Amino acid sequence: MCCFAGPVRSVANTRIFARLTDQGTQFLAYQMKYASDKQNAMILPLPTEPGAGEDAIKFIDLSNYERFFSDLRKGFPSITPKPMLRSYTSDSAIESKAIVVHQVGSFVASFVPSVNDFARLDPQFSISKEVWAHIPSYADYGFAVFQLKELQAEVHPMAFEFQTRMPNSVFFPTVHIHDGQVHEVEHFEHDLYFQHHAYDLAAGTRYTSTPNYATKWVRSKSKAADFVIVGKALGLVDGELLVHCKSMIGNFANKDVILKGDIPARAGALNLVLPGALCSMAALVPIGWFLNRRNKLMRAKNVK
């Protein structure tokens, strides 16, 4: 699911992929199936730095890799997707330089640096300031806007790299606005995927179809290059890392999913560092015995 400029009749089979980089950016790819009675736009709030310019985002054209998420799913052979169709219905300018638009595959895409900058965008592809005011954390966010050409479609993945203010956290834009209102609880039908080296360490070496006890996510059967065409992914995917997956089906609090990168690292540290510490302690046992024995012999010699 996501935020739409206008009411939509249905949204289903939402899939999101995320990966942090070492350069203070995050990759994000998004795909869903939707139906709308009028021309619409999908809007993704992003934790960019306050005051970031329009160059804070780099759009990536995945029109030649429409099966990107299908390939990601191949990394989890024991898990079958459970897409559900749910309908959403609704009863229902400042003069400045226009927002730059980009042709990205079948989309016309734009980056809106702040809530106030929506005034520079065509109103039919915007969400009003009054609606955004219900989510105060977005007051200084940026927004990726994708104009949807068709009234009904399963779009090819929308993808981009953005400068994030949260370089140690993985951000999934999962807030729903489907009818011009922000509800406290919404119905989610999401498959979330991401890559992170700390989660790889914490997840261990054995694949199962159930969430790992340390990460709470399902790890892929092997590294990404075994089931994703890395070259066609245009930098989104690190072929040497695992992919981690979680399905969110049901009613959840209407908020974004944010993963702290250091949480599984701590869990992994318990798995990876503690055994080493125990080995070090074991190595000290014979040394301690030797020193204790030497002291006893010296004391005995002194007594004589």
Image: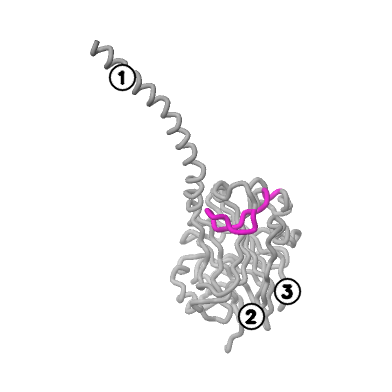
Task: Pinpoint residue 142: horizontal percent, then vertical percent.
Answer: 52, 65
Task: Pinpoint residue 112: horizontal percent, then vertical percent.
Answer: 55, 67
Kind of residue at badge 2? Val
Considering only order in the chain, which callout, 1 or 3, is on the residue closer to the N terminus? 3
Please tell me whether mark 2 or mark 1 is closer to you in this view. Answer: 1
Which residue bears the numbered disc 3?
Answer: 153
Most foreground residue, 210 or 55? 210
Kind of residue at badge 3? Ala
Q: Residue at x 74, y 52 (%)?
A: 229
Local secondary structure at mark 1 = helix
Report the Cα–Cα distance between label 3 and label 2: 12 Å
Considering only order in the chain, which callout, 1 or 2, is on the residue closer to the N terminus? 2
Which residue bears the numbered disc 1?
Answer: 296
Most foreground residue, 135 or 14? 14
Relative to 117, does residue 286 appear above or below in the rendering? above
Report the Cα–Cα distance between label 3 and label 1: 84 Å
- The magenta-colored residue range is 208-225
Which residue bears the numbered disc 2?
Answer: 8
Kind of residue at badge 1? Lys
Which corner quadrant of the image does residue 144 belong to? Answer: bottom right
Residue 82: in magenta span:
no
